[in-house]
Amino acid sequence: MDEDSGGDGVVKGKSIRYAAVWLMLLSLFFGGVANAATVVQQSSSYVFVDVKTTYWANEAIESMASQGIITGNPDGTFKPEAPITREQLAKLITLTFGLDLVEAEEQTFSDVSPSSWAYKYVESSKDYLTGYFPMKGKPFFDPQAKATREDVAVALVRAMGLATEGVDADSALRWKFNDYGDISPQLAQEVAVAVDKKLIQGFPDGSFKPNAPINRASVATLLYRVLKSSYTNASKDVQLDVQVPANVSEATIKITGKVNADAKVYINEDEVENNNGSFAEAYSLDEGEKVYEFVFKAVLPNGRSKIVKKQVTFETTGPKLTVQAPDTTNKPSAQISGTVRDSSDSPATVWINDKGVHVSYNGEWSADILLKEGVNKIVVTAKNKYGKTAVVEKQITFSLAGPNLVIDATPEKTNKNTITLSGAATDKNDNSPKIYMNDQLVGSYGSFNKTVTLNEGENVFTFKATNNIGKSSATITKKITFLSYRPELVLDLVPETSSDATITLSGTATDNNDSSPKIYMNEQLVGSYGSFNKTVTLKEGENVFIFKATNSLGKISETITKKIIFSVGGPELVLDLVPETSNDATITLSGTATDKNDTSPKIYMNDQLVGSYGSFNKTVTLKEGENVFTFKATNNLGKSSATIKKIVVFTIAAPELQLDYIPETTSNGQITLSGNTTDANDSSPKIYLNDQLVGSYGSFNKMVTLKEGSNSFIFKVTNKYGKFTTVEKTVVYTPEEAKE
């Protein structure tokens, strides 16, 4: 167990401020590695898995943890036996004792560079922690080495300002510790003081172990005892920095200052609030102009104090006076207003031309004064209770002027023949001045709005206003040039060519001065309200159309000429399918003809009319071989379509004969012969058996008597076109007796 597991040796006399710093620093220190410290806040119940209730430092660890000073690791452990490094101890000492962080220009230790996170802490605490200064070479600090018990003892003694003069370390330590020789000789006095003040103790075996590292549990216990102690031996001087102005002109001043956070502060024997090392107070210099003396005193808990005296000279200036007044006016009275500010007198008094005026609590004042025509001199005087004055002079020129006339914006040029003119006149002495345009009254109540018709060219308008006392405004002249435009004519699409005998032409005309311009086509009126839609019949060849528009002012638009070439075409003839070959003697031919200019074109086949209303359907009888048909369509304008020829080759086929079953041999003396025939061009072909007619309507049924032996039958079928088909059959007749 560490030597801090028992004993009643504690650091006494520590101030509340030091304890608070220890709390803050340890919460940083035990949160992780010093150069990347992270404070991890625990819950209100601190139970570390590796710190049992029977552990020697459990009370200290749990108490420090419950206050949020130390925290465990993310895995729930505290690792009480883990040591701290020298650079971590440097930070701990710096923060604990409130040492000012220094930015040393020169690096003290060769192994702690300015880029190190610990640099400023090592430099700040170098008077409290031992460094290493070899006979040869550069000083070094060994920042990542484990902090030893000797390091901690010396740092506490130095930081707490404990006296070491006259201490006999040899007699104080040699008899107490059997390893006294291991203590660094140059540090023996400070170790002796630390042991004497019970800041640190030895071990039961009589050793001190000056070079042994301090673990987390020992540091927690040491700090726990420091927090519980009342030891208050401060290690630094009393701080008292006061900021107060030496000279003031206002009766209230503000005093601020910096002081030790744990000090009491007094101003002229009255205690004031110390807000974590700062104080601020306001004082009223109510005894008038003189030199005031302030005595400041700061007292630390250990009784050390510091006194600072400051003098403040109070001498007032005159009031600050502002005045607002018009330079000119055409009214017989004017309002004068302003503010008066004085830090030593609220409010000061104000006179206008030796006549007092009322001043409000916030220093604002105003008054109406009568004016005489011409220049009026105004003197405003402000005076405070100390007799200091401020004077402001103003001049107001009062003249009876005519009305102020303003004409609204008018264009210099326009293409519209009417325009509305407007304006307003104001007069401080007349609410209803009259307004004239070209010497004619256009407004009796200070404004006008007049629509006028313009003449072609320049139009001149002269305006003036008069008030009820005969004063006139300055004359305002406006010139407006009216240049009327001719109408703008836009035609809808006009084709250059057409195969239609009729076409519709249309368009629109717009004009700034005429809502209904007229439109002419070939000098004939086709539209009276700015648009037209006219259907015309075209003649074959070129058709010329000339358009123009006129407005009510006689202006004519640009002339637009359009040319349309009308080409009359023949009808379009479309024949239905005509086969190139056919086995049928008759065939129906059909088709249609369309024409843009004739709804009933005529259709001819081989120069014979076959359709008068744009279509035909004609059945014709074919001759065997080539059949030629010539088709033509004509419209009512005498135009014909191209001739279309189709050739149909007609081949007359022979009838087809289908016989019923005929045996090749038989023992019967009689058999019946039957069958039927078909023909595409003859519904009643004739059937012959051995040149004898046996059927005239496409079928036959004939019983014949056989002769013994071979019987020959010749079947022949013919149609009305002389086409025939012949089939031969042989039947052998063998009587039954002959078979036996």
Image (cartoon, rainbow, N blue to C red):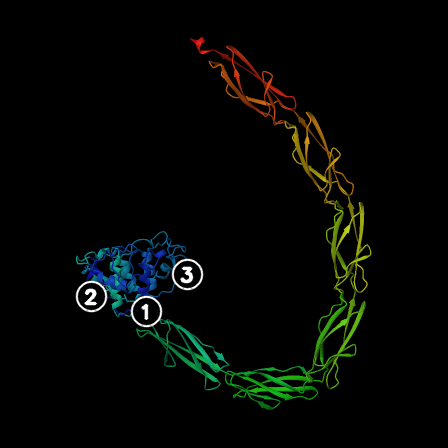
Q: Measure the C-alpha gap from mark 1 to mark 3.
A: 24 Å
For label 2, the crowd category at 10 Å Cα-Cα, with few meaning under 14, some 14 to 19 and many 20 or more, is few
Q: Quadrant of residue 72?
A: bottom left
Q: Compared to 401, does 717 lie above or below?
A: above
Name the foreground residue: 603 vs 689.
689
Mark toward the viewer: 1 or 3? 1
The tag earlier along the polypeptide, 3 or 2, is 2
* Residue corresponding to mark 3: 103
* Residue corresponding to mark 2: 8
Under mark 1, the amino acid is: Arg
Q: Position of residue 592 (x, y in %)?
A: 69, 39
Q: What residue is drawn where x is 78% and y is 45%?
A: 565
Mark toward the viewer: 3 or 2? 2
User: Do the numbered discs 2 and 1 sit on residues whose CB atoms are within 8 Å?
Assistant: no
Q: Secondary structure at mark 3?
A: loop
Under mark 2, the amino acid is: Asp
Q: Quadrant of residue 547?
A: bottom right
Q: Secondary structure at mark 1?
A: helix
Q: How many marks?
A: 3
* Residue corresponding to mark 1: 17
Which label is found at residue 232?
none
Q: Measure the C-alpha gap from mark 3 to mark 2.
A: 40 Å
Q: Measure the C-alpha gap from mark 2 to mark 1.
A: 23 Å
Q: Relative to residue 169, is residue 282 drawn left or right?
A: right
Name the foreground residue: 201 vs 191.
201
For label 3, the crowd category at 10 Å Cα-Cα, with few meaning under 14, some 14 to 19 and many 20 or more, is few
Q: Relative to residue 320, is residue 124 drawn left or right?
A: left
The tag earlier along the polypeptide, 1 or 3, is 1
Q: Compared to 204, does 734 lie above or below?
A: above
Q: Position of residue 260 (x, y in %)?
A: 36, 71
